[in-house]
Amino acid sequence: MMMNQNNNIGCTVTECKHHAQNSNYCTLNKIEVTKHTNQANCAECTDCSSFECKC
Ligand code: SF4
C-alpha cells in the first residue's frame, strides 16, 4: 500500500509503520511528541509517541 507522505513531518525512523519508506517523512496527519524526563533539556529527552513498530 502506498501511503502519502506529510511534507510537514520529516522523520528518519524507517522502523516505524507510519514512515513513508521511500522518503524521509511521516505519513500521519498529526503526531504526538512527548518528553521522557521531567525536564527536557536536550533533543534526546523527546520522543515521537506516535511511533509503532513495523515488526
Ligand atoms: S509516527 Fe513518529 S516515528 Fe513514526 S514515522 Fe511518524 S514521525 Fe516518524
Image (cartoon, rainbow, N blue to C red):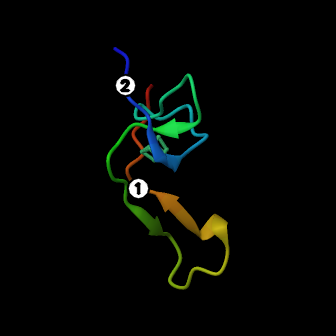
Q: Residue at x 50, y 83 (%)?
A: 38
Residue placed furthest toward the top: 1
| Residue type (three-letter) at the residue carrying disc 1 | Ser
Q: Quadrant of the C terminus?
A: top left
Residue 23 on image: x %, y %: 58, 29
Nearest the eye: 31 or 52: 31
User: Residue 49 has which mark?
Assistant: 1
Whether ligand 1 has any atom under 8 Å from the Cβ at mark 1 is answered as yes
Residue placed furthest toward the front: 7
Q: Residue at x 32, y 47 (%)?
A: 29
Q: Residue at x 56, y 44 (%)?
A: 11
Q: Is residue 3 left or right of residue 11?
A: left
Q: Is residue 50 left or right of residue 48?
A: left
Q: Is residue 43 left or right of residue 17?
A: right
Q: Quadrant of the N terminus?
A: top left
| Above or below: residue 54 compared with residue 41 | above
Closer to viewer: mark 2 or mark 1? 2
- How crowded is the residue under tag 1: few (<14 C-alpha within 10 Å), some, or many (20+)? few
| Above or below: residue 50 compared with residue 26 | below
Look at mark 2 in the image and give the residue it sits on: 3
Q: Residue 34 sits in which quadrant?
A: bottom left
| Above or below: residue 36 compared with residue 16 | below
Q: Earlier in the sequence, mark 2 or mark 1?
A: 2
Nearest the eye: 26 or 40: 26
Q: Residue 42 sits in which quadrant?
A: bottom right
Residue 35 on image: x %, y %: 49, 71
Residue placed furthest toward the bottom: 39
